[in-house]
Amino acid sequence: MCAVNASVGESEMRQSENSVYCHRIVAHFVKAFDFVPFFKNDRDGVKKSEDYKVFSFSSVAQRDAVSALLNSNLVYCWVVTYSDVYHFGRDLILDCPCDVPRLADEYGSALKSANKRLMDKLKKDCLRRRIPYRTTGIVEYDEFYPRKAKVILTKSIRSWRRFTD
């Protein structure tokens, strides 16, 4: 993976409809979505949580490839190696070694299918949490359980494993 001369950041665009929303805290797994996870507080109403960083790409195929990549064990191992194992900040994600256009071109249909199954499963199994905060009032957010989607994650990794060889 680290022998690749390209990075996710080389394919990221300033703004696009094809975005990945990645949570800045790893806590045992990476959380990356092709939708905006629900978040609401009494002070601001419904909005995107500031904990999610937005990464935009030129096509749906690139978005799905990056979403699948970020949710993989391979990237988790990379995060453990190159970070403090807690923060998954914007710079670390942009530096992640991957030739995104090539990954999308060679494995696009398999990754699109795996990513859709993963996103559907994460949405189905999420729980809406409500927590009171002194400054913002009641905060509601969706909590996700990737463990329940392990089979889908494993299949998505198999679909592009040869890409990293």
Image (tube, grey):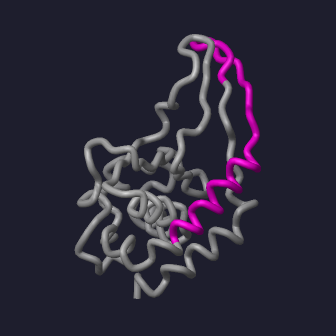
Magenta segment: does it hold 161? Answer: no
Viewer-closest of 61 and 124: 61
Identify the residue shown where x is 64% and y is 74%.
154
Asked if one can make out residue 39 in the rendered structure from this viewpoint, the answer is yes
Viewer-closest of 17 and 151: 17
In the rendered view, would you say 132 is above or below 146?
above
Viewer-closest of 23 and 61: 61
Identify the residue shown where x is 51% and y is 45%.
23
Q: What is the quadrant of residue 118 in the picture?
A: bottom right
Residue 35: percent from left, percent from top:
54, 44
In the rendered view, would you say 10 is above or below 22?
below
What is the span of residues highlighted in magenta in the rendered image?
A: 111-139
Numbered disc total: 0
Asked if one can make out residue 97 in the rendered structure from this viewpoint, the answer is no
Identify the residue shown where x is 58% and y is 73%.
156
Residue 2: percent from left, percent from top:
33, 76
Q: Quadrant of the C terminus?
A: bottom left
In the rendered view, would you say 8 is above or below 53?
below
Q: Quadrant of the N terminus?
A: bottom left
